Image (spheres, rainbow, N blue to C red):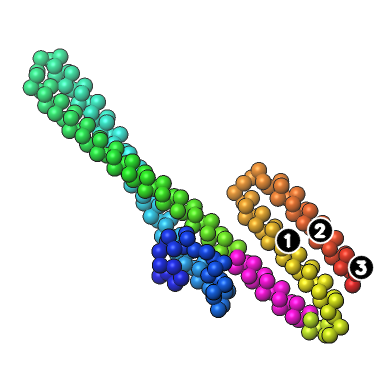
Amino acid sequence: GMAVFKRLTDILRANINALLEKAEDPEKMLRLIIADMEEALRKATISTAQAMANAERLKARYERAIALVEEWKRRAEEALKAGDEELAMRALEKKLEYESRAAQYLRAYKEAEAVSEKLRNQLDELKAKLEEARTRYTTLIARKKAAEVQKTFAEYTGGFGDEVFGKFERMEERILREEREAEALLELSKDDVEDEYERLERERKLREELEALKSRMKEEG
């Protein structure tokens, strides 16, 4: 069952930042949000697949009915050629029956197709929302780790380490930011082969930046 959200629309409308600001334990809150979203995604994937299958079924039935309209029209013509008007009338009756059936299937198919389209869009939104929440979680954990490292560092350097500590903090922040950028970049380019070269180039630059930063730190420290 859903812990944070009651409905799928609640998830799609949710402002993750606002939820986290209100939360006593943002990390726990994010875990709940992600669990909710994963469950919703599982269900939405199933409903979307069902809706798509339903639309396909109706389309097939519509096409079959249209084929039968043509078939009974042909039979009516053959009956007339053979001089059997009564048989021709019966065939035309069948033709009309399948025409009305085809019209019904077409209407139902169009409705099913619209539902399917709506669900597909919701599914895409949900995936994006889940990705956003996961990225937030990664960031949150990374910040927590950085804070722990800084605390240890401050304790280790004692009172005189303020200047070094400030420098270290800036370095941490920058590395964190660049890690996040690299991660976001990776996520974005996962589906897109064309972006692969750009990603490699960006990563190379990132590493250069990081190395430069490290050697600057050594010189200053």
- At label 1, the amino acid type is Glu
Q: Residue at x 85, y 60 (%)?
A: 212
Q: CA distance from mark 3 to mark 2?
A: 15 Å
Q: CA distance from mark 2 to mark 1?
A: 9 Å
Q: Are marks 2 and 1 in contact (CB under 8 Å)?
A: yes
Looking at the image, residue 150 lies above or below residue 52: below
- Identify the residue at image location x=92%, y=68%: 219
Residue located at (75% from left, 49% from top) = 201
Q: Does 167 appear above or below 92?
A: below
How many C-alpha atoms fall within 10 Å of the one at disc 3: few (<14), some, or many (≥20)?
few
Q: Which residue is mark 3?
A: 219
Image location (x, y in percent) of residue 162:
83, 79
Residue type for callout 3: Glu
Camera-side residue: 33 or 82? Answer: 33
Q: Residue 31 at what x, y percent from top left?
A: 53, 71
Q: Earlier in the sequence, mark 2 or mark 1?
A: 1
- To which residue does mark 1 refer? 178
